[in-house]
Image: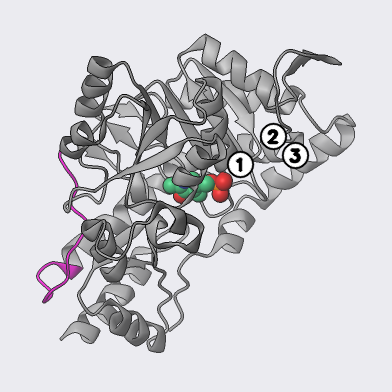
Amino acid sequence: MMIPFLDLKAINLAQAAELEAAFRRVLDSGWYVLGHELERFERDFAAYCGSGHAVGVANGLDALTLILRAYGVGPGDEVIVPSNTFIATWLAVSHCGATPVAVEPLAATYNIDPAGIDAAITARTRAIIAVHLYGQPADMDPINALAARHGLKVIEDAAQAHGARYKGRRAGALADAAAFSFYPGKNLGALGDGGAVCSDDAHLAATVRLDRNYGSAVKYEHLRLGVNSRLDELQAALLVEKLATLDAGNRRRAAIAARYGERLAGLPDLTLPQVPDWAEPAWHLYVVRHPRRDLLARTLAAAGVGTMIHYPVPPHRQPAYASLGLGEGALPLAEAIHREVLSLPIGPTMTLEQADLVAAAVAAALR
Ligand SMILES: *Cc1c(COP(=O)(O)O)cnc(C)c1O
């Protein structure tokens, strides 16, 4: 038995004809940056998310950074971030010259604990970034209410949550602005790097549109100190095709998650994902928790089951953030999660039979 953690090649080959036709469209157009393919993708993706505007950018980290820059976040400012996230959430804050202030997660969902945010707000706080980690929406209503009371912006890091819903509304339309990544392994993945900013705020969207292109709307007229962070025509054309199959892929992911939920229930010391009744996750990852996680991963590898760890070391324990002085024990909930989580195979081309084999291998390892 060999069940890969994620079979990206199979995912893209399943759409080979559409992707090849998209490539041909771009090749024949002779136009490769900021053209009709990007306009079409931005229209489609905004409509999909239920957001007023979508602006294509080069990657998810840039999407976050450009939102913060457009809101004027800079040196001396603080931005609240989850302690339990991929480091890009923090790096976006640092790249603006601001300071990430970490708030611990809820044990049940691994997402930022709204109750912990209040105590982290200071006179310097400008914004809160909520991450929909593993594709599960963060509890946005209390976060938005708190932000409104303090005059703060709320930004969704939706890099793992394409298509997820919170109380019926899609990720990307749940706060002031949202950042998406189209890194190949995400639920909506390009064949290279890509990202987008979604927002109902026309001014924010227009500012990001300027900033992604040297601060320019009219060639050689530069209104802001922008960067080069554009989603190219080829990736946009491929993403138009892949967006059309996102919901089907997410449905398969949900079916696999449900199957794991049935087959893995009650195994000793194994914690399964918990989904609040208002959440419809995109199931980017299926993350279980076990006190002897490394042994479980090794046993599964020996049985031919690919797993990964999201993530092995939290941002505050990375050498890059040594200057914050947050030692071991500073953020104990995030640290414990990083020691114990394991991501099982899940994806749009995986079968329920494969999920059963994975579940049987987990059960055999733990009994
Ligand atoms: C992937 C990811 C990012 C960064 O996206 P890139 O396109 O790789 O820059 C940011 N935040 C989270 C939670 C992610 O998973």
Badge 3, how many Cα within 10 Å: few under 14, some, many 20+? Answer: many
At label 1, the amino acid type is: Asn
Residue closer to the observer: 295 or 363? 295
Distance between the alpha carbons at the discs numbered 2 and 3:
15 Å
Q: Is mark 1 within 8 Å of ligand 1?
A: yes
Percent x, y of residue 58: 66, 38
Instruction: Say which of marks 2 and 3 sits in front.
Output: 2
Q: Which mark is residue 229?
A: 2
Question: Which quadrant of the figure contains the C terminus?
Answer: bottom left
Residue at 55% of width from left, 21% of height from top? 70
Q: Which residues are magenta?
A: 264-277
Instruction: Give the vertical position of 233 relative to 354 (above or below).
Output: above
Percent x, y of residue 256: 32, 58
Residue at 40% of width from left, 29% of height from top? 155
Residue closer to the observer: 45 or 159? 159
Q: Is mark 3 within 8 Å of ligand 1?
A: no
Q: Circle 2 — which element?
A: loop
**Which numbered disc flags the more N-terminal residue, 1 or 3?**
1
Badge 2, how many Cα within 10 Å: few under 14, some, many 20+? Answer: many
Residue at 15% of width from left, 36% of height from top? 115
Q: Circle 3 — which element?
A: helix
Percent x, y of residue 287: 30, 61
Badge 1, how many Cα within 10 Å: few under 14, some, many 20+? Answer: many
Image side of residue 183 versus residue 198, left or right: right
Residue closer to the observer: 56 or 90? 90
Distance between the alpha carbons at the discs numbered 2 and 1:
8 Å
55 within the magenta span: no
Instruction: Say which of marks 1 and 3 sits in front.
Output: 1
> Label 3 belongs to which residue?
234
Q: Which mark is residue 59?
A: 1
Q: Quadrant of residue 56?
A: top right
**Which numbered disc flags the more N-terminal residue, 2 or 3?**
2
